[in-house]
Image (tube, rainbow, N blue to C red):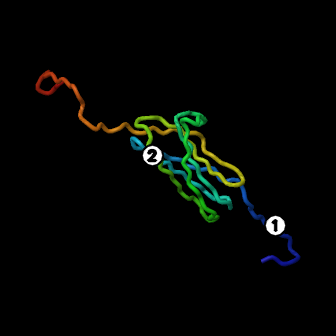
């Protein structure tokens, strides 16, 4: 408690730009990816999280850059919250560039641009037109 004749300082954190997403990871299949990130605190203002991804290293081409969005909330007690977005309809065995952005009414914070590579597609039918030659008891070519 503070008596009326004592000096005191009180710091109140007001609304601020969002905190940069941390520890971004991507788990892929042949045609999808789950990108996850950690938000260490929410800056007292509703935040929206965007995953921008595409084939262009600078994520600038409107033909090959897409945005998946996740609306955040105003829970000012959300510390170390893990978020993720699943993106689908990706091309197999293809390198994509991506970044995660936190956006609120006071600004934007983003990760650096990262890469993910989708896995190779599983063959849907056996190989065709194979020739097998007997080269010995333990080998075939």
* Dot 1 or dot 2, earlier in sequence: 1
Q: Nearer the viewer, residue 136 or 29?
A: 29
Residue at image coords 37%, 36%: 120
Residue at image coords 76%, 64%: 12
Give the residue at mark 2.
88
Q: Of all residues shown, which one is farthest toward the front?
A: 63
Q: Position of residue 44 (x, y in %)?
A: 68, 61
* Label 1 – label 2 distance at C-alpha: 52 Å
Give the residue at mark 1.
9
In this view, the mark in front (1 or 2): 2
Q: Position of residue 8 (x, y in %)?
A: 83, 69
Q: Secondary structure at mark 1?
A: loop
Q: Secondary structure at mark 2?
A: loop
- Residue 3, quarter of the rendered image: bottom right
- Residue 113, quarter of the rendered image: top right
On screen, 92 above or below 42?
Answer: above
Asked if the residue at tag 2 contacts the one at tag 1, i.e. Cβ–Cβ closer than 8 Å, the answer is no
- Residue 56, quarter of the rendered image: top right
């Amino acid at each position: 408690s503070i008596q009326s004749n004592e000096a005191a300082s009180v710091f109140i954190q007001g609304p601020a730009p969002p905190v940069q997403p941390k520890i971004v990871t991507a788990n892929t299949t042949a045609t999808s990816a789950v990108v996850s990130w950690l938000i260490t605190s929410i800056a007292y203002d509703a935040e929206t999280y965007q995953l921008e991804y595409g084939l262009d290293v600078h994520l600038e081409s409107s033909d090959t850059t897409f945005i998946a969005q996740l609306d955040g909330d105003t829970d000012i007690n959300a510390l170390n919250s893990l978020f993720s977005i699943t993106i689908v309809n990706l091309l197999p065995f293809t390198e994509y560039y991506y970044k995660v952005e936190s956006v609120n009414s006071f600004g934007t914070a983003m990760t650096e641009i990262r890469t993910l590579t989708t896995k190779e597609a599983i063959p849907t039918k056996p190989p065709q037109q194979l020739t097998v030659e007997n080269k010995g008891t333990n080998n075939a070519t």
